[in-house]
Image (spheres, coloured by chain):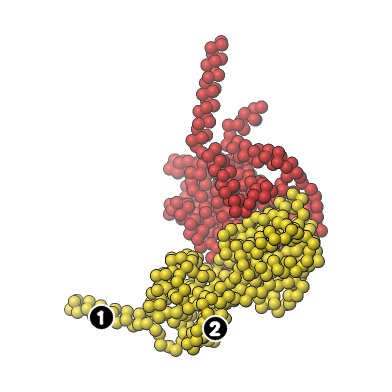
Chain colours: A red, B yellow
Amino acid sequence: MKIFKKLIGSQIMLPLIALLVLVLFNLIWDPSFFAISLGANNAGDPILKGNLVTIFDYGSELAILAIGMTLVTAASGGQDISVGATIAIAGSVILRIIRGNEVNVDTMKAPLIVAFIAAVVATMLVGAFNGALVSFFKVPPMVATLIMFTAGRSIAGWINNYDNIYIGDPRFKIFGGVVPGFPVPTAIIIALVCMIVIALVLKFTTLGLYAQSVGINEKSAKLNGINPIFVKFLTFVLLGVCCAVCGLIQTSRLGTINYSNISLNIEMDAILAVALGGNALGGGKFNMASSVLGAYIIQFLTVTLYKLDVPSTAISAYKAVVVIILVVISSPVVTKKIKEMKSRRNAKEAARKAGVE
Amino acid sequence: MKRVMALLLVAVMAIACFAACGGKKSDGKIHVGVINNDPSESGYRTANVNDLKAMFGDGNTNNYAGQFFYSLKNDEQIEAAKKMITDGVDYLLLSAADTSGWDGVLKDAKKAGVRVILFDRTIDASADLYESSVVSDMAKEGEMAVAWLASQNLAEYNIIHIQGAMGSAAQKGRTGALDKKVADNANWNMVVQQTATWDANEATKIVASAINAGKSFNVIYAENDGMAQGAVKALDDAGISHGVGKDVIILGFDCNEWALKELKAGNWNYDGQCNPFQAQYLHDIIQKLEKGETVEKQIIMDEKGFDATTITDEDVKKYGI
């Protein structure tokens, strides 16, 4: 009961309610939505099947991005809109290295770990560029990251000379598929690892505290010995690392890259995940679990709409309606009203009690 | 003294300007300005850009001196067109980002004696402002694919149709033919029709959702190769066989080289082309115009469709993009 009461007042309530509504809706509409079964894929490896698996599998990238985006939002009070383009760069770097000098390859020409490290370095550089503009030059985040938003996909194209690459190596496809013999999609595991890592980092380091204090009041944070420039810079670099992980998963799923379409508009979903998590987009306090939950809710919504056979001409409109409702509920005005209503009721009750006594 | 210097400078500048804007260049070459969309737009565009570069760019063997400009923005393209006209190109080859807004600059071109040829996309301008246009017939691409599908003589067609970005020319053309066939034939059923906006991952989700809902289907008609591949990923994960002689027929579009290889391997059944190799058509038009011959106002390119059972390794090399 105590835990429940604590939950009601907390920030994670909003995404939980949204999730509950989606779950209830699907339960009533068609309970088989939640069925999970064990099957085999065409390579003969066991794999879990079902809508929930699809949601968690394809929600992985968004959940990982939401982690980085939450930190950036908290510290800088703005959002990075270049994450989709940065993922394109990461994916392009990975393919550039493992394809060697050919366009269609059946076996990797270089160890994947080398390719991945190169991608991490590349995205950290992109993050450092964004972070330097935001922290040192005090450019508003959305304007600073607009540069990479515009240029990133062209850079991704240049890295591979705009070649139409295809990697047929089954070892490469593990990250977007399954490890032979283990039925849970690898992307889910990767996302889980990222969540555990960030949970440990937030628990045992001061990153979370520093990011929040810089976001709440930069000057007082500085007076307390925190270097706001470094903290902001660091959050952008960390988001870069998140992008590299997403780039690996995305390219591994299909073995190809489409420079203009890979992770298109994912920045909007990542920002939405942070907002759905009830985090203030103006910076300051954040709740990491809420953001991650927000990311999965977006996937849940998409898969539900596909399941309902919503016409393709109307699907974005349906999504928009749900998003409007969620955003309005979480807006400061509404939350303030709810709080007022609650305190008024509490006051009434207290008055009644006092009268009885 | 200062005044004399200033006057001298003005004179020099004026002369320089005259020399620069002095109309046609006289180095014996055919000067061609190419305005295209950015190669990052798609694999199709990359192939298109490379094809034009090989024909008109450095090192070409047809006596062309080419200059190129790429942008996905109409206003930037118009600015570049103005610059090329002032540079005195003989031909302006144009694939416009947007259909409107080109009247003014094309009139300037006409006045300056620059001949305009449209490729890939048409624009809303009076037809006497350009010499010719080389275009793809997206509706025909769809019709060819649907005709091929009909020739498979299945008893029943249960189709998952994955559409491109709604409203794009490719989506409209490729959807139109299939919609008509499904409406006209009782044994053609649309099981799922959904847009993945050209995104392979969305296509996977759509097909996985259909599988999870227990829907039965035997055809996947995806409007580009990426989405076809995404759909195939969902089938692979679910352990459903696909390709020549298997449970599900796979159709894709664009003829990426890797897609044609899938076709050759029998994992897919059909891939429709959207011909990006337009340079030869443009070359023929220019040569005709140079000789003073007349050319047709609109030239519709030949497009191919490949069947997995008949495709050859040469086809993969030659037509793969």
Out of A133 and A95, give the one closest to the viewer.
A95
Q: Residue A31 at x, y = what percent?
A: 74, 41
Please, what is the three-letter code of the amino acid marked with disc 2? Asp
Residue displayed at 70% across by 41% down: A29
Quarter of the figure with residue B258 = bottom right
Q: Are marks 1 and 2 in contact (CB under 8 Å)?
A: no
Subunit bearing disc 2: B
Please, what is the three-letter code of the amino acid marked with disc 1? Ala
Q: Residue A277 at x, y = what percent?
A: 58, 42
Mark 2 crowdedness (10 Å alpha carbons): few <14, some 14-19, many ≥20:
few
Q: Is residue B27 visible?
A: yes
Quarter of the figure with residue A169 = bottom right
Residue B279, placed above or below residue A135:
below
Q: The C terminus of chain B lies in which quarter of the figure?
A: bottom right
Out of B64 and B113, give the one closest to the viewer.
B113
Q: Which residue is mark 1?
A: B11
Left or right placement of residue B114 versus residue B179 in this view: left
The residues tagged by marks 1 and 2 sit, at their Cα atoms, a distance apart of 44 Å
Q: Residue B222 at x, y = what percent?
A: 67, 62
In the structure shown, which secondary structural element does the residue marked by tag 2 occupy?
helix
Residue displayed at 29% across by 82% down: B15
Left or right placement of residue B214 versus residue A340 in this view: right
Question: Which labelled disc corresponds to residue B184?
Answer: none
Residue displayed at 65% across by 67% down: B142
Q: Is residue A65 visible?
A: no
Residue B68, placed above or below residue A238:
below
Please tell me whether mark 1 or mark 2 is closer to you in this view.
2
Out of A40 and A131, give the one closest to the viewer.
A40
Mark 1 crowdedness (10 Å alpha carbons): few <14, some 14-19, many ≥20:
few
Earlier residue among tags 1 and 2:
1
Question: Which labelled disc corresponds to residue B284?
Answer: 2
